[in-house]
């Protein structure tokens, strides 16, 4: 009988084996590279992204503001000219959400902000470069360390007829209003006095000096940070709201108690 001898392999491999080896090699190489890149990135100091430039502000203005204010800030029938408003006015209007305007009305209401602070700064810088106007004050004007007593008196004389003596705001004519200042920042207080937004007059240095503005800001910041000694401020409207509270709840409670006692006795 013929004897069967095992056949030797001819050295050929499956074509799938080569593909598998290449795939494994790529995975290993990619993993090593990703790990090394992460380690290098972690060891390097983080750099802060550069601030937006005036040119970036110009592009933002053209995309979001030029429809109403014109490409050259000259104004249109839908919006006023921005000549001379300066960066301070732009920062105030945009960072409080008043601009871009959502719809025409008696005045622009405060609403959620649509831009980042970096974008707002770029818009303000672009406006200042094209048509200079009021700029940001020195830091000490906003530090809240002025004369609070003098500032409160100046506020009562110049501002309380619209904003209320407690800075709680108030109604004006034709659907307009003076906003409350209970949460307004020091910068926006100064900007409002210098630029005169909406129906507010401009208080230049001949009307209120820089130090007097600082005193008013200090008084308003003091009011914001001081709690009501009675617990409930009742709108800080003084004896009117306090008397109304007593009449409604105090005397009302006494009348209800009297009626209850009379009903029990009968």
Image (cartoon, rainbow, N blue to C red):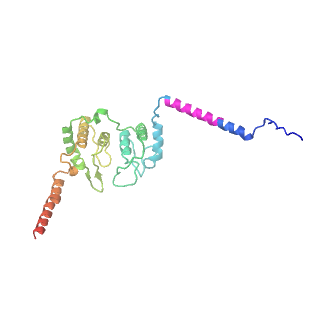
Q: Would you place residue 54 above or below residue 76 in this image?
A: above
Magenta segment includes 44 = no
Image-based side of 134 in relation to 171, left or right: right
Q: Looking at the figure, which quarter contains the C terminus? A: bottom left
The image shows a total of numbered marks equal to: 0
Expressed as whole percent of the image width and height from the top left, the position of residue 83 reads 39, 42
What residue sits 30% from the left and 54% below the top? 176
Expressed as whole percent of the image width and height from the top left, the position of residue 145 reads 24, 34
What residue sits 56% from the left and 31% below the top? 36
Q: Looking at the figure, which quarter contains the N terminus? A: top right
Image-based side of 225 in relation to 11, left or right: left
Image-based side of 256 in relation to 39, left or right: left
Residue 14: image quadrant is: top right
What residue sits 47% from the left and 45% below the top? 62
User: Which residue is more in the foreground, 61 or 151?
Assistant: 151
Expressed as whole percent of the image width and height from the top left, the position of residue 220 reads 24, 42
What residue sits 29% from the left and 52% below the top? 177
Q: Which residues are magenta?
A: 25-42
User: Which residue is more in the foreground, 231 or 123?
Assistant: 231
Expressed as whole percent of the image width and height from the top left, the position of residue 107 reads 34, 52
User: Which residue is more in the foreground, 64 or 260?
Assistant: 260
Image-based side of 257 in relation to 77, left or right: left
Main SS class of the magenta portion in the image: helix
């Amino acid at each position: 009988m013929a004897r069967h001898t095992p056949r030797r392999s001819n050295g050929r491999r499956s074509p799938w084996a080569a593909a598998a080896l290449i795939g494994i090699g790529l995975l290993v190489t990619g993993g090593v590279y990703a790990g090394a890149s992460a380690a290098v990135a972690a060891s390097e100091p983080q750099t802060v992204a550069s601030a937006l430039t005036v040119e970036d502000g110009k592009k933002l203005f053209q995309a979001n503001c030029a429809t109403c204010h014109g490409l050259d800030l000259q104004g249109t029938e839908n919006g006023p000219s921005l000549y001379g408003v300066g960066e301070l006015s732009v920062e105030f209007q945009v960072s409080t959400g008043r601009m871009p305007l959502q719809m025409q009305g008696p005045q622009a209401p405060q609403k959620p902000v649509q831009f980042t602070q970096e974008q707002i700064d770029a818009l303000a810088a672009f406006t200042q470069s094209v048509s200079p106007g009021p700029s940001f004050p020195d830091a000490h004007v906003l530090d809240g360390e002025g004369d609070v007593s003098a500032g409160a008196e100046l506020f009562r004389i110049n501002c309380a007829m619209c904003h209320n003596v407690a800075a709680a705001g108030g109604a004006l004519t034709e659907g307009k209003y003076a906003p409350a200042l209970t949460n307004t920042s020091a910068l926006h207080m100064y900007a409002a006095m210098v630029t005169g937004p909406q129906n507010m007059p401009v208080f230049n240095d001949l009307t209120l000096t820089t130090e007097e503005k600082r005193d008013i800001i200090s008084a308003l910041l003091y009011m914001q940070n001081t709690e009501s000694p009675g617990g409930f401020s009742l709108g800080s409207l003084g004896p009117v709201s306090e008397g109304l509270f007593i009449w409604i709840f105090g005397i009302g409670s006494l009348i209800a108690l009297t009626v209850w006692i009379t009903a029990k006795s009968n």
